[in-house]
């Protein structure tokens, strides 16, 4: 059976025109999951029953003329780091195996309110720590372009699900690139909104000052539609911005005419060159050239402190994470390992954390604990916060000269599963270009830029804009997408190899 | 543990004490510090919880604006600076009653800092500097089930998270020096005054027995004339005014004994035992725990506008010592009377009784006499006795009218304590009013004279003082419901 390759906009149009029903669409995607997810492993949990129930309710609303908006009835996959009432939420960790949240994340509540059936929860690096989804305690996700390769991370599940047509839309979270880098290596679109633009309430925090949920889609305008559903002020998240979300769909539709006249595009000198794969750079340069031809004014900008961004990130993130993850102590929920003998509460905590956390999580807890220790705080965490300010100043200066900044999203295309799993530093380098945006809170999008010549695998272009100017990344992103699709004569994903159907015809259910 | 203590006089001969008090106050906000859960005391365990105060994955805190307001008002009442910008921090440590295994607190940026208050002991004023007052959340409450009642030796432990997230203000003094022998009394007077101040602000129930005001006493001794402080201990669980005084005195004597023998005081946490009146060693603090404080990234800074702070300052109630001076002048109380009234926690009750029409002296007489005695018997606060100031004023007005005498008035208080209604209803129901029927009185006097001819003769011989015996007999017959003065007049008339 051929997959439903329609975009969210196309599905919404078909629903609005009465050509199909949400139940039909949802069932088709569940069937696709059943057929290919045995190979992809994008999902940790599929909620066929709940999705179909929500789809039927959406159809009933539509018949009654009470549809809740454009995306009512369009199904979606949600990264397993978002709390979902009644649905398992593991964050890719053994320590949360079996935990069913009693509440919905605000993003999830927005999805339910807007009528999007939730297909299931997607795979991720444990607690979002990683760039390959290999650190999931439940096994890696495979890249639909090449099943031997990683789909990026930490949100490899969401990106792979969208790339493999298992879901038209997905929710990701981006702490250092976990939406954008998977988007780049799977040929999909991913947006990290302005920090505070989308509520973090119910997002199981990796690093609170960096985390941001956002859309994972196949087109820029789909991302804008989804962003408008999940964005906006949330009184439950003190760091959420109390301002209206800019008109994102409008910006994307305007950009889709491919005209960039008068737009100043800044190429960041520090995000390219050494350490970047040749084919990735070639595709990036072509994209810049296309944008120039479309009327954009291209300038080179320098952000000298970006070279310290990775080191800064790997102090701030582990520090916050080490504290966030302290709550996993077997006292109230999740895994509990009780050692033999007459163990104390502390013994149970120790044994549970030993068994429940993977190596990468333990590594970062140790790094963070050290960075926050008395006597080291100023040298590490304190210093990192200062560099963070310098990175933000670099952005401020660059945005004086350019409306948006561009760079390759990730330095390489998808690498082989297992290739870097034992080399944390090599793994960390994947986020070189995406991290600065998280450090300063600015929004960014990754759009597919084509296939690298060396390996025929997707690469991405990242477009960054000033805080609260998310509309700019949609306008420029949509324009670039239009220009590239014209060049290719179709979407990049159309060039992806067909996936063999391996699953049985029945709808999958439950944790795999 | 130290076996022998130094006598208090010996302590003072050799050492100067430095006091430091840390008081945790539970605010009486309707909801918790970082979520909307109710804060009612004594609810079924774990019924006042939500994802945030249980620290469930993904949950986030939101600052309770009312708690910030209370913190600022406390700071202002303690003459503190109010921060223009301050943050919360995470205090990281593992404990089963800590839902997140970090406490959201304030660290180096308290909301209020650098203040003072003045307390009076035996007519002398002592200035207590306030280092800081900061906001934090309470932890859950562990109950260890087993023979020991403590975590060691418990069969199992239960945790109630209703208390987790209740707003706390921690008020820390600067080292209080120069109190000498009065250190224990100053400690007590400070906590008592703080309690009164918090009550006046209406920000806390300040019930020490329920734990809504908890006190840790820091104490160190330095050899007389030394220019640096000695090593301190922090005594926890000092949860009554009396204990504050006793624990301070005990630690002074214990430290002195250690130091006098050439020993070194261990910097540690100690636990106060109300029953035995001693402290015992808790955990050592020498290898100070590393709480890995860092700014709470889930909360934005608290930045109270100056206009708001000034408005709160303008609306503060009168400071306790000014109020006390004003009332003393208005009431015409002596210093001793005023101190006793304040010491009994009866200032407010007396004021309300006066406002309801009683004279200052009668109001004081009832509250510090009859009613204080009954409160002591029941081991409760005067305020919890269940007698309203207006009732006391009414009883006194009945006495003034001649309807009651003091003895009958006491019976009206019996009725009030038993919940028999208003003073007037009790007088009616119990038939307590003084008998003013001259015929009945006259008859009772005749009976008494007839029954005690010898006494009557003495009075006839001019020994008027003997009349007391006859008055007693008449009052007995009248079941106390007679005006003793009128009885005396009648006796003297008849035997004159």
Image (cartoon, coloured by chain):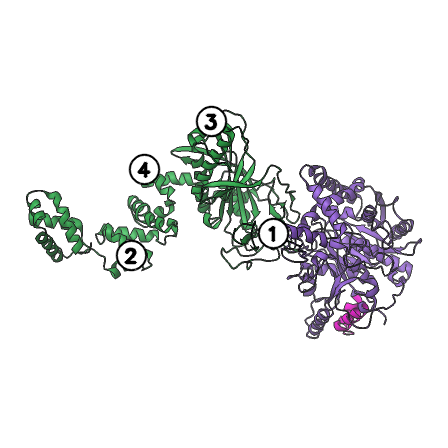
Chain colours: A purple, B green
Please give the range of residues in magenta: A9-32
Judged from the image, the secondary structure of the residue bearing numbered disc 3 is helix
Q: CA–CA distance between discs 3 and 4?
A: 36 Å
Foreground of the two, B406 or A262: B406
Residue under label 4: B334
Q: Which circle, 1 or 2, is nearer the viewer?
A: 1
The numbered disc on residue A31 is: none
Above or below A326: residue B339: above
Q: Tell me the subunit letter for badge 1.
A: B
Q: CA–CA distance between discs 1 and 2?
A: 53 Å
Q: CA–CA distance between discs 2 and 3?
A: 58 Å
Judged from the image, the secondary structure of the residue bearing numbered disc 4 is loop
Q: Residue at x 37, y 49 (%)?
A: B382
Q: Which circle, 2 or 3, is nearer the viewer?
A: 3
Residue under label 2: B423
- Report whether mark 3 lies on the same chain as mark 4: yes
Marks 1/2 in contact by CB < 8 Å: the verdict is no
Marks 3/4 in contact by CB < 8 Å: the verdict is no
- Report whether mark 1 lies on the same chain as mark 3: yes
Residue A25: x percent and y percent? Answer: 78, 71
Determine the main secondary structure of the stretch shown in magenta.
helix
Q: Quadrant of residue A227?
A: bottom right
The numbered disc on residue B14 is: 3
Which quarter of the figure is the C terminus of chain A placed in?
Answer: bottom right
Lower position in the chain sequence, tag 1 or tag 4: 1
Residue under label 1: B96
Apparent side of residue B472 relative to residue B19 in the rendered image (left or right):
left
Q: Which circle, 1 or 4, is nearer the viewer?
A: 1
């Amino acid at each position: 059976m051929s997959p439903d390759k329609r975009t969210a906009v196309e599905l919404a149009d078909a629903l609005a025109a009465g050509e199909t029903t949400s139940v039909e669409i949802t069932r088709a995607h569940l069937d696709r999951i059943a057929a290919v997810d045995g190979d992809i492993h994008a999902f940790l949990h599929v909620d066929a029953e709940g999705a179909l129930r929500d789809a039927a309710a959406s159809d009933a609303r539509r018949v009654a003329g009470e549809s809740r908006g454009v995306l009512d009835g369009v199904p979606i996959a949600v990264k397993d780091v978002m709390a979902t009432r009644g649905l398992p939420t593991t964050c890719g960790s053994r320590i949360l195996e079996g935990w069913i949240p009693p509440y919905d994340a605000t993003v999830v509540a927005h999805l339910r309110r807007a009528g999007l059936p939730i297909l299931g929860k997607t795979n991720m690096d444990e607690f979002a720590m990683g760039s390959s989804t290999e650190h999931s305690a439940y096994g890696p996700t495979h890249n639909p372009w090449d099943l031997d390769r990683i789909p990026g991370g930490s949100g490899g599940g969401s990106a792979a699900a969208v790339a493999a047509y298992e879901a038209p839309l997905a929710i990701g979270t981006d702490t250092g690139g976990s939406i954008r880098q998977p988007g780049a290596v799977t040929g999909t679109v991913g947006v990290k909104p302005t920090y505070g633009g989308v509520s973090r309430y119910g997002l199981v925090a990796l690093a609170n000052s960096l985390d941001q949920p956002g859309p994972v889609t196949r087109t820029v305008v789909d991302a804008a539609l989804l962003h408008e559903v999940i964005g906006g002020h949330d009184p439950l998240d003190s760091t959420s911005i109390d301002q209206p979300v800019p008109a994102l769909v409008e910006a994307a539709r305007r950009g889709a005419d491919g005209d960039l006249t008068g737009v100043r595009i800044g190429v960041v000198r520090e995000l390219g060159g050494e350490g970047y794969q040749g084919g990735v750079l070639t595709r990036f340069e072509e994209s810049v050239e296309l944008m120039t031809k479309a009327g954009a004014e291209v300038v080179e900008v320098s952000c000298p402190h970006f070279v310290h961004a990775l080191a800064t990130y790997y102090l701030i993130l582990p520090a916050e994470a080490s504290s966030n993850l302290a709550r996993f102590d077997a006292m109230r929920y999740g895994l509990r390992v009780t050692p033999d003998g007459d163990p104390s509460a502390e013994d149970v905590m120790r044994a549970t954390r030993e068994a429940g956390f993977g190596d990468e999580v333990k590594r970062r807890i140790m790094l963070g604990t050290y960075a926050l220790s008395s006597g080291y705080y100023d040298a590490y965490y304190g210093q990192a916060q200062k560099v963070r300010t310098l990175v933000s100043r670099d952005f401020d200066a660059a945005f004086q000269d350019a409306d948006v900044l561009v760079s390759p999203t990730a330095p390489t295309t998808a690498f082989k599963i297992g290739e870097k799993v034992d080399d944390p530093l090599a793994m960390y380098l994947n986020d070189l270009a995406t991290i600065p945006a998280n450090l300063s809170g600015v929004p960014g999008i990754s759009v597919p830029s084509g296939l690298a010549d060396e390996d025929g695998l997707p690469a991405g272009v990242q477009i960054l804009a000033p805080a609260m100017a998310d509309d700019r990344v949609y306008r420029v992103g949509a324009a670039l997408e239009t220009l590239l699709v014209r060049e290719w004569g179709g979407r990049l994903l159309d060039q992806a190899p067909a996936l063999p159907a391996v699953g049985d015809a029945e709808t999958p259910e439950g944790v795999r | 543990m130290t076996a022998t203590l130094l006598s208090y006089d010996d302590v003072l001969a050799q050492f100067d004490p430095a006091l430091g008090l840390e008081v945790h106050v539970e605010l009486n906000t309707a909801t918790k510090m970082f979520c909307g859960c109710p804060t009612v005391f004594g609810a079924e365990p774990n019924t006042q919880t939500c994802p945030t105060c249980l620290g469930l994955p993904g949950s986030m805190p939101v600052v309770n604006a009312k708690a910030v307001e209370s913190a600022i008002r406390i700071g202002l009442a303690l003459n503190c600076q109010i921060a223009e910008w301050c943050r919360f921090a995470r205090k990281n440590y593992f404990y089963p009653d800590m839902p997140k295994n970090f406490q959201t607190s304030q660290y180096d940026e308290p909301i209020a800092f650098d203040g003072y208050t003045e307390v009076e002991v035996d007519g002398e004023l002592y200035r207590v500097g306030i280092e800081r007052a900061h906001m934090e959340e309470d932890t859950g409450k562990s109950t260890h089930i087993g023979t020991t009642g403590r975590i060691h030796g418990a069969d199992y432990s239960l945790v109630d998270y209703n208390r987790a997230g209740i707003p706390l203000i921690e008020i820390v003094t600067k080292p209080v020096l120069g109190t000498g022998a009065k250190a224990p009394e100053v400690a007590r007077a400070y906590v008592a005054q703080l309690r009164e101040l918090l009550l006046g602000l209406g920000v806390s129930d300040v019930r020490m027995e329920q734990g809504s005001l908890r006190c840790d006493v820091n104490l160190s001794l330095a050899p007389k004339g030394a220019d640096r402080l000695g090593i301190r201990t922090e005594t926890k669980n000092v949860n009554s005014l009396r204990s504050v005084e006793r624990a301070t005195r005990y630690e002074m004597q214990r430290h002195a004994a250690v130091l006098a023998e050439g020993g070194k005081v261990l910097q540690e946490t100690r636990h106060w035992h109300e029953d035995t009146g001693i402290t015992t060693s808790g955990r050592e603090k020498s290898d100070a725990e590393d709480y890995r404080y860092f700014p709470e990234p889930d909360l934005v800074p608290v930045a109270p506008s100056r206009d708001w702070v000034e408005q709160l300052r303008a609306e503060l109630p009168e400071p306790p010592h000014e109020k006390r001076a004003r009332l003393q002048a208005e009431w015409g109380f002596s210093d001793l009377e005023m101190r006793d009234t304040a010491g009994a926690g009866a200032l407010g009750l007396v004021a309300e009784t006066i406002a309801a029409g009683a004279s200052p002296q009668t109001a004081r007489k009832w509250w510090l006499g009859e009613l204080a005695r009954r409160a002591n018997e029941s081991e409760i606060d005067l305020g919890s006795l269940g007698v309203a100031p207006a009732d006391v004023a009414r009883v006194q007005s009945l006495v003034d009218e001649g309807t009651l005498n003091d003895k009958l008035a006491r019976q009206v208080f019996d009725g009030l304590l038993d919940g028999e209604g208003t003073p007037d209803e009790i007088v009616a129901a119990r038939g307590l009013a003084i008998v003013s029927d001259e015929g009945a009185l006259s008859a009772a006097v005749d009976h008494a004279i007839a029954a005690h001819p010898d006494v009557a003769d003495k009075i006839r011989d001019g020994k008027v003082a003997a009349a007391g015996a006859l008055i007693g007999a008449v009052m007995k017959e009248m079941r106390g419901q007679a005006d003793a003065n009128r009885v005396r007049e009648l006796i003297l008339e008849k035997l004159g």
